[in-house]
Image (cartoon, helix red, strand yellow):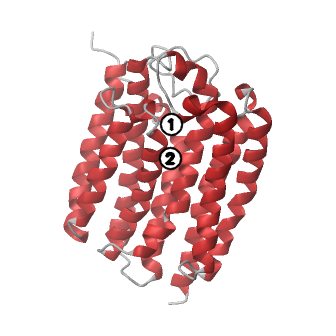
Amino acid sequence: MPAARTPVTTWLAAVRPGFLVITLASAMLGVVVAWSCGCGRDLPAAAATVLLALLAHAAVNLYNDYGDAVGGSDAVNHARIAPFTGGSRLVQDGVLGAAQMREAAQMLAIVVVGGGVWLAARAGPGLLAVGIAGLALGWAYSSPRVALMARGWGEVAVAAGWWLVVVGADFVQRQRFDAIPAVAAVSPALLVAAVLWVAEFPDAEADARVGKRTLVVRLGPDAAAWTYVALVAAAHLWAWAWWRALWLPTQAGWALASALPAAGASAWLLAHRRTPSRLRPAIVLTLVAAVLHPLLLGAAFVAVAALR
């Protein structure tokens, strides 16, 4: 008898679609930054950019599940806060194999590369550098051979990857690199790193048991909690400083509204940093901040584009 095919719903669960909203907001931000300067409005390329960014994130999530399955951290993680930490657990529950996760990630990566080459033909070869850097970071983050996530470099890799999402989406429309998207991308990237940071608290015990030395494991709960506070503060101070310097639109002050959920997450994390099982509100509020910030920043650039 032929082997049963894996249902589509299983693969949707495997890519953890809830987190893809962050990439959707970041890619849309890059698109509208370019539109705000009148630097082109290529709708098919914009749609393809957003789709490829989502597929790239999905591939990274699948490969991350593979890396954690091989490394053993998800198997010993009994303190996860579903669905935010500890991976999809489809490998641990016997629904999918680790090799299936890796192969699916590779297939999506091939699609992303093919789409990226098509976009580069429209926008310019500079996009290839962005795409190669992004895929390399996604691979190095989870690869058992490199495992940036286990060496204290995972948070930096995540921030760099999502910075590239905004810069790359802008490049597709603008067809050149520019300082404005590079500046605008920093604060959303820092908030995405903050999502990873707070999610590492419930996983820290399991990570430490298998030698996965994330920064939260290395710093311990007290220093890691205060570093989280500094990280989300830095994201908002960055946006505020460049808004005051008039590099960002007048309406970019809207994006500072994400400081409210970030402040709530900070307070909750500081209060419960040693009881990670109680950190669901902090994780949810950080996710809200990480999505709200690029959406409001993007709305500011849309307002500029509407005046042209």
Q: Who is closer to the viewer here, 74 or 113?
A: 74
Q: Residue 89: x, y in percent?
A: 51, 22
- CB contact under 8 Å: marks 2 and 1: yes
Looking at this view, is 236 or 53 the one in front? Answer: 236
Is 139 on the left-hand or right-hand side of 77? left
Residue 96 visible, this angle:
no
Q: Can residue 161 be seen in this view?
A: yes
- Circle on res. 279: none
* Residue 4, position as x, y percentages in the image: 35, 17
The x, y position of residue 25, in whole percent, is: 53, 58
Q: Position of residue 85 (x, y in %)?
A: 58, 31
Q: Name the residue under label 2.
A: 20
Q: Residue at x 35, y 53 (%)?
A: 52
Q: Nearer the viewer, residue 61 or 1?
A: 61
Q: Looking at the image, is 132 positioned above or below residue 197?
A: below
Q: Describe the element under mark 1 as helix, strand or loop.
A: loop
Q: Is residue 265 left or right of residue 106?
A: right
Say above or below: 213 vs 154. above
> Is 196 rendered above or below residue 86?
below
Q: Name the residue under label 1.
A: 16
Q: How crowded is mark 1: few (under 14 residues within 10 Å), some or many (20 or more)?
A: some
Q: Which residue is drawn at 51% across and 36% down?
A: 16
- Label 2: how many Cα within 10 Å (few below 14, some 14–19, many 20+): some
Q: Is residue 7 above or below residue 56?
A: above
Give the side of residue 221 with respect to residue 7, left or right.
right
- Residue 71 image-quadrant placement: top left
Q: Residue at x 48, y 69 (%)?
A: 183
Q: Quadrant of the N terminus?
A: top left
Q: What element carries label 2?
A: helix
In the image, what residue type sits under mark 1?
Arg
